[in-house]
Image: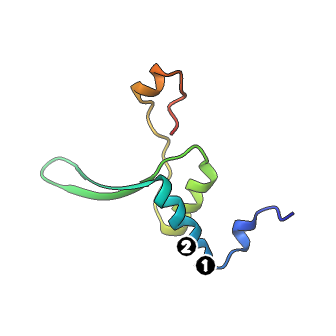
Amino acid sequence: MQKNSYENLSEKNKILFLAGLFDGEGSFGIWGKGNGRKTFQCSVEMCDEDSVQKFAEFFGGRVVKPRKRKKDLDNGGDGVV
């Protein structure tokens, strides 16, 4: 069995894999930054940090840990979604 089959994918197949990842776990949004400035962002939130890192490395961006959300704490979750 191959150790990391993602690394062996062609660029086209990496895009297909990451597109599916974004379709299931991603979102787009426009956020206000104060002074009337707005930014367009996309995000992928999931527990598998390795997949999120692959997405950021391929398309650019950075990986940040999500803040704990009140609903996660109420349900005994760890805040990672």
Label 1 – label 2 distance at C-alpha: 6 Å
Q: Residue at x 39, y 55 (%)?
A: 27
Q: Are marks 1 and 2 in contact (CB under 8 Å)?
A: yes
Q: Residue at x 63, y 53 (%)?
A: 50
Q: Which mark is residue 15?
A: 2
Q: Quadrant of the N terminus?
A: bottom right
Q: Amino acid at mark 1?
A: Glu
Q: Is residue 74 above or below residue 68?
A: above
Question: How was this image coloured?
Answer: rainbow
Residue 38 is left or right of residue 21, and the answer is left
Q: Amino acid at mark 2?
A: Ile
Find numbered disc 2 in the image and state the secondary structure of the residue it sits on.
helix
Quarter of the figure with residue 67: top left
Q: Which residue is mark 1?
A: 11
Find numbered disc 1 in the image and state the secondary structure of the residue it sits on.
helix
Question: How many discs appear?
Answer: 2
Q: Position of residue 71 (x, y in %)?
A: 41, 26
Residue toward you, 14 or 37: 14
Q: Which mark is residue 33?
A: none
Q: Residue at x 71, y 69 (%)?
A: 7
Q: Position of residue 12 (x, y in %)?
A: 58, 79
Q: Residues within 10 Å of mark 2 (few under 14, many from 20)?
A: some
Q: Position of residue 46 (x, y in %)?
A: 53, 46
- In the orientation shown, which residue stands out farthest toward the left? 36
Residue 60 is left or right of residue 11, and the answer is left
Q: Residues within 10 Å of mark 1 (few under 14, many from 20)?
A: few
Q: Position of residue 64 (x, y in %)?
A: 48, 46
